[in-house]
Amino acid sequence: MEWGMANRMAQLIQSDGHALFLPVDHGYFQGPTRKLEEPGTTLEPLLPYADAIFITRGVLRSCVDPAHSKPVILRVSGGASMVGKDLANEGITTSMEEAIRLNASAVGISVFVGSDYEKESLLNLSKLVDEGERYGIPVMAVTAVGKELEKRDARYLALASRIAAELGARVVKTYWCENFEKVATGCTVPVIMAGGPQVESERQVFDFVYDGMQKGAIGINLGRNIWQNDFPVAMIKALRAIVHQNATAKEAQEIYDSEKSVER
Ligand code: 5RP
């Protein structure tokens, strides 16, 4: 691996081999998402506990202080919205030159395997990988499911993740699912778990994150289940303990409960 690529990967994946990415990119297709109406305010208390942020260029420029940031994974796909015809109809929105100008440590793009736009999104990924490799910038592929959340099973996610790795993604972001080991072992590059819509209890989040880590994920890219929680700092600290200190779900719950009283 070239020095630049290796250096950027090391900014993202920490020396223990694990990573906690904090996504705040949701506005690129869903507008001002609940609790992300003012991304700078949402991010500020959480930033110290994230290894990297996943963000669009617009929000990065307008809401993040360049003097106090974290490694940036730049969201470079988009062009569709919640109210449009098809969320899968995305293109590349941001050039590699812009990613370099913004000192991005990586770029991220969604692929929509099984959708009407499967081919376009996969060829967009390939094109991005060609450009990223030229400049030493890793590509994170996001196995997106659009509105079809029921697609989040091991068979589908293993298929989509492996295809993304075959096309050259350096990291794959996918969802946790039952039998997650099938997804992680079938993917030849590191796998990170996204969270999806907020679930009912913190404990459910700790349970699936712990399970996924035991089954081969190297970390998380969790957004709504952190910053839509009533105690987001307690939440990210508890999750950090699972990702970086090998804490169990029960231990994470204890951290959350005690940190919650501090954050109150
Ligand atoms: C949005 C994304 C998000 O980064 C991803 O969905 C993770 O966030 P959440 O945990 O809220 O699902 O790719 O397109």
Image: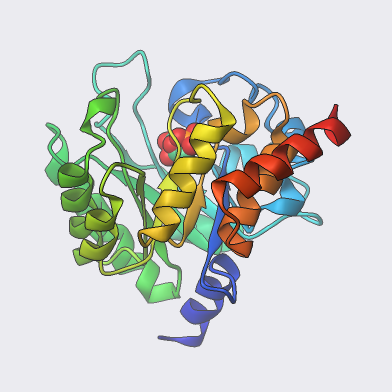
| Whether residue 198 is visible | yes
Image-based side of 9 in relation to 191, left or right: right
Residue 226, horizontal then vertical, whole percent: 61, 35
Residue 19, horizontal then vertical, whole percent: 55, 61
Residue 240, horizontal then vertical, whole percent: 64, 53
* Residue under the point 37% across and 75% down: 134
Looking at the image, the residue that sits furthest to the front is 250
Image-based side of 114 in relation to 219, left or right: left
230 lies above or below 47? above
* Residue under the point 63% across and 63% down: 245
69 lies above or below 253? below
Image-based side of 196 in relation to 150, left or right: right
Query: Hey, which quadrant is residue 150 in on the image?
Result: top left
Classify the position of the N terminus by image quarter: bottom left
Q: Total of numbered circles in the picture? A: 0
Which sits in the foreground, 48 or 53?
48
* Residue under the point 58% across and 62% down: 246
